[in-house]
Image (cartoon, rainbow, N blue to C red):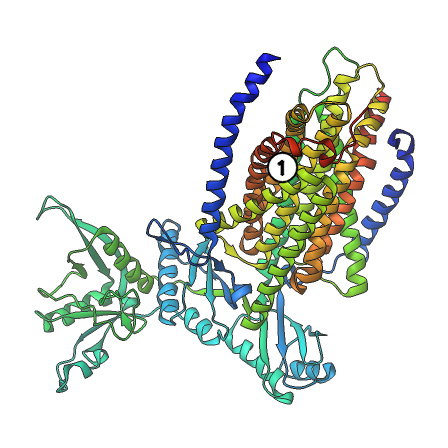
Amino acid sequence: MDQLLQQNETKTSTILIKFVFILILAAAAVYLILPSSSLLFGKEIGYRLGLDLQGGTQLIYQADLSRIDPSLHDNAMASVRDVIERRVNAFGVSEPVVQISGDDRLLVELPGVTNVDDAVRQIGETPFLEFREENLDIELPENIEELDLGVLFVPTELTGAHLQRAEVTFSGSTSALNTPEVTLIFNDEGRRLLTQITERNIGRGLAIYLDGLPIVDTNGDGIIDENDPPYAPIVNSAIPDGQAVITGNFTIEEARELATRLNSGALPVPIQLLSQQNVGPSLGQIAVVKSLVAGLLGCAAVGLFMILFYRLPGLLATVALIIYTALSLAIFKLIGVTFTTASITGFILSVGIAIDANILIFERMKEELRVGKTLQQALHEGFRRAWPSVRDSNLSSLLTAVVLFTSTGIIRGFALTLGIGILVSMFTAITITRTLLQIVIRVPAFNRTHLFGVVKAS
Amino acid sequence: MFSISRNYKTGFIISTLASIISVVLLFVPGLHLGIDFRGGTLIEVKYPQTVSIADVTADVESAGFSNIVVQQVSDVQLIIKTSAIDSADDHERLIGSLSGRYGSVEELRFDSIGPIIGEELKRRSVWQGIFVCVGILLYVAYAFRNFGDKNNLMNISSWRLSWAALIALAHDIIILLGVFVVLGMLRDLEIDTLFVTAVLTTLGFSVNDTIVVFDRLRENVTRYRTDPLSQNIDRSINETMTRSLNTSGTLLFVLLALALFGGQTVFYFVIALVIGVIVGTYSSIFIASPLLLIWNQKK
């Protein structure tokens, strides 16, 4: 008996440490979920709303790679992605998504864009790569700022159709540093044109344009548009062999980006629109409000039920549930989960699952109390015996969430929030509720079985 | 005390009948597949004034679209379904045909899904279902690997437990699908991606109840090793009954809130989950546990 008491005493300090830890965790979570917390260690964080909530368009394209050598498929897809990203950025969409899915699919998401016909048209066009030479007849305006950058160069006959491929190479001979370069290899017709063009332009720039805009972001503002000055490497000498090398202070990344874009014009990959989904902004706003109301009411109903049915432990479980909500939201914000109707539903559903662990444990505690155990013992036994059930049932739900996560789109979001919800709930329903209960039963006023919904066995 | 070992036959009869009816319904008339699966276009528009469905249908048809279905959301709001559209020109033409008679429409939603995507979704859904089932089968067999006592008559192979759980699952899914065939007939409801999610989620949930009962059974066959299996099954079900009802109850609270206030996009998704929760709780009591009893009596 002495030993038991001693054990309890040492436990009290551990419990208090745990309690303080929980308080800190909860405070941190609440702080994080506030809309004003938008920076964490210099990293930007925020809630991301899906297309169905903020309105916008999702397009799925399939690329036709049948005429591309299989070993170049990845490169070709990277080129297609890059071209579309350029075009999407040119529309001025905030936070667009352009990603490759599977082997030959491309997913484009345009938040806020609801009139998509122009976007669809431009995205679907085959990329056009061209080489332009300096316009020698240009009259410079008096005010240099009024100069139209577009007239500085005029098109030549040389286009992407003449380019076989572009690749990143390294100049090993001149310096030990292996400076990256981009090598362009032209076909026979291209070789002839390149020779003519370079002969007459020695010492001048030869500008490269993709879709009518400079091929790289020359003014460095992150968007390629009419304000970018032309990207025009200087022709050092006539090039007779159809192999042009662009040197410059490239990083490997920059060289790769340039080569990818040149290739998108060299190996145009036709794309076909497989599916498009478009949600107007008004429908999205209604959905946000509805989901929030549903979530709050659902949680409130669960809390009320728990308090009515399980009394004191139910109240503590409700506290744990609130912490659970804050923690989950903080995690969603941290890892950048996109909120859609489906992912919010997944989260709300996980509240229902979160409480199951508590119900299992409390039922077990009641049973132990009924056979005459003390609260201390019942608490210990309740958690110990309910654990296998909690573990096994949650793992089977988690298994489903993992399988669903292999989907794409909204189902993936649903699976993600459900899965995170299940994991977080295991922690809150067990660790947090248990710590709170352990504290409460040390207070004599609360140490009464009827507060636990049990009439003491005689 | 409620005795499942004496009453399971009634449950079996009801479940067998319901399952047979559901399977028949799945063949005739079958599930109504939505555009997610078939491929096609769905557009929801708002008009500046009250419109007639017949006029709109005629306008869309004369613009050259086929397989047209027009549904009324409200006096001024319609959902129009037609075949898949894969170009901006066709989209503009569709909007044009809708805007001609009553003034320009506001486009609330536009989905167009090509048949390739639909086929893929069908295939993937089936595979995911198979993965979840196999996963659960293996997991239950593993979780209950030391069920009972080696020297004890009640030593049941954990594979029996996992097959019992799987049969209960199959029962839940078949009935859920059956109910949706009926809803499809009554409410012109179509099956979409969210429904597949609901079905797969039901798989995960409904096995929970079964696991909880089995878990208690594992404890009881060790504690009351001289009692017959039937008595231990009855005992386990009764001891976990409050938990099962309370858990399903709270889940239903949450789902009810979602169904009432969550908006129309998730309404039937939630309904599918509600059916899944109810059938899942029922089957863990009336299907999974009695199956153990039957298999062990035959031995």
> Where A170 falls versus A124 (above or below)?
above
Where does the N terminus of chain B fall, quadrant-wise? Answer: top right
**Residue toward you, A271 or A442:** A442
Residue labelled with disc 1: A394
- B276 vs A200: above or below: above
Residue B174 visible in image: yes
Q: Nearer the viewer, residue A99 or B281?
A: B281
Q: Residue at x 74, y 10 (%)?
A: B151
Where residue B61 appears, as percent x and y from the top left, is: 67, 81
Quick one: A419 or A352, which is closer to the camera?
A352
x, y (%) of residue A75?
Answer: 35, 53
Secondary element at image label 1: helix
- Amino acid tagged 1: Asn
* In this picture, residue A175 sits left or right of residue B104: left
Above or below — where is B216 with respect to A136? above
**Residue, far top:** B151
The residue shown at (58%, 51%) is A414
Chain of the residue displaying label 1: A
- x 91%, y 35%: residue: B9
For residue A183, what is the image quadrant?
bottom left
Residue A182 sits in quarter: bottom left
Question: Can you name the residue that lies furthest to the front here?
Answer: A445
- Does the rendering let one see residue B138? no
| Mark 1: few/some/many CA within 10 Å (<14, 14-19, 20+) | many
User: On the rendered structure, is A342 left or right of B289?
Assistant: left
